[in-house]
Amino acid sequence: MYNDLFSIGPITIHTYGLMVAIGVLAALFTGEARAKKRNMDADALYPMTFLCVVLGFCAAKVLFCIVEWKNFVQNPLSVLNNSGFVVYGGILGGVLTAYLYCRIKKLSFVDYFDLMMPSVALAQAFGRLGCFFAGCCYGRETDSFIGIAFSQSDYAPNGVKMIPTQLFSSAGMFLIAGILFRYASKERPKLKVGALYLILYSIGRFTIEFFRNDHRGAIGIFSTSQFISFFVLVLGLILFFRNQKSEEKA
């Protein structure tokens, strides 16, 4: 696909960056609108989102360096300059940043976690569209009618039909976002919305990894993201059903 949209002097605007920016803004504005309906401090979302995005990207790069530790030891600058990131690192970094921000500002982290996770899923959906235009996170080769061949990608093999895992991931995240927004439209026990995000995302990520073919590290027979997904799923299930029991007792 075409990642370079246009250039302004030495600056090139990339479709990937544009989709990520749209995703962040979509997450911010939907979160703000929902915060106002819940009488929460919507203004706090602006600095919180900025910090989560910046430090989340840093955490995603750190986890990428860990995954690529052998190459990092041999040539750290090459790995740091590589455009690779690990999404789970970004999610974990963003959540930790939000937690620390809420502690400092004396806000309820749990309330903001439940508030923003549907919006985070929406942001990820746009981000995966960016992956498609950039050609990263590509799928396995295929002869089926769903295969898409890239012609100007700096990441995916060009001229080879591959499963469009980026589009499947994006569609899946739009679906997850819709489920979470609908689920959160009614009052739920604390952490239940966030827990449902962890469950749905980990299952979707574990599944799509079977169809990807880009280099992303491995732990045993599983990819790094599949390995992390297992623990995220367990955590999500514990939080969700613990709150389910609390709701039934109430």
Image: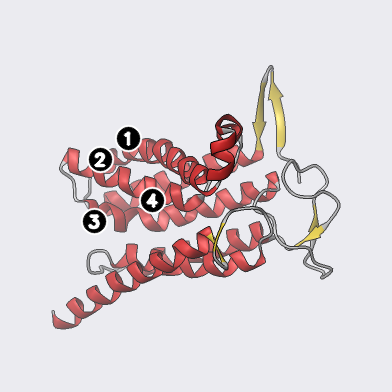
In the rendered structure, which amino acid carries the disc numbered 1?
Answer: Pro
Of labels 2 and 3, earlier in sequence is 2
Identify the element where label 4 is drawn: helix
The chosen color scheme is secondary structure
Dot 2 falls on a residue whose secondary structure is: helix
Q: CA distance from mark 2 to mark 4?
A: 14 Å
- Return the disc, 1 or 2, that comes first in the chain's sequence: 1
Q: Amino acid at mark 2?
A: Tyr
Q: CA distance from mark 4 to mark 1?
A: 18 Å
51 to 201, vertically: above or below: above
Marks 4 and 3 sit apart, C-alpha to C-alpha, by 15 Å
- Compared across the picture, whether 119 is left or right of 244 comes to right
Asked whether disc 2 touches disc 3, contact meaning CB atoms under 8 Å apart, the reply is no
Tag 3: residue type? Val
Q: CA distance from mark 1 to mark 2?
A: 9 Å
Side (left or right) of 10 relative to 204: right
Label 4: few (<14), some or many (≥20) within 10 Å? some
Which element carries disc 1, helix, strand or loop?
A: helix
Can you identify the residue that label 1 sits on? Answer: 47
Tag on residue 101? 2
Residue 241 position (above or below residue 112): below
Which residue is denoted by mark 3 in the rendering? 110
Q: Nearer the viewer, mark 4 or mark 1?
A: 4
**Marks 1 and 3, the one that precedes in the sequence:** 1
* Secondary element type, mark 3: helix
Callout 4 amino acid? Leu
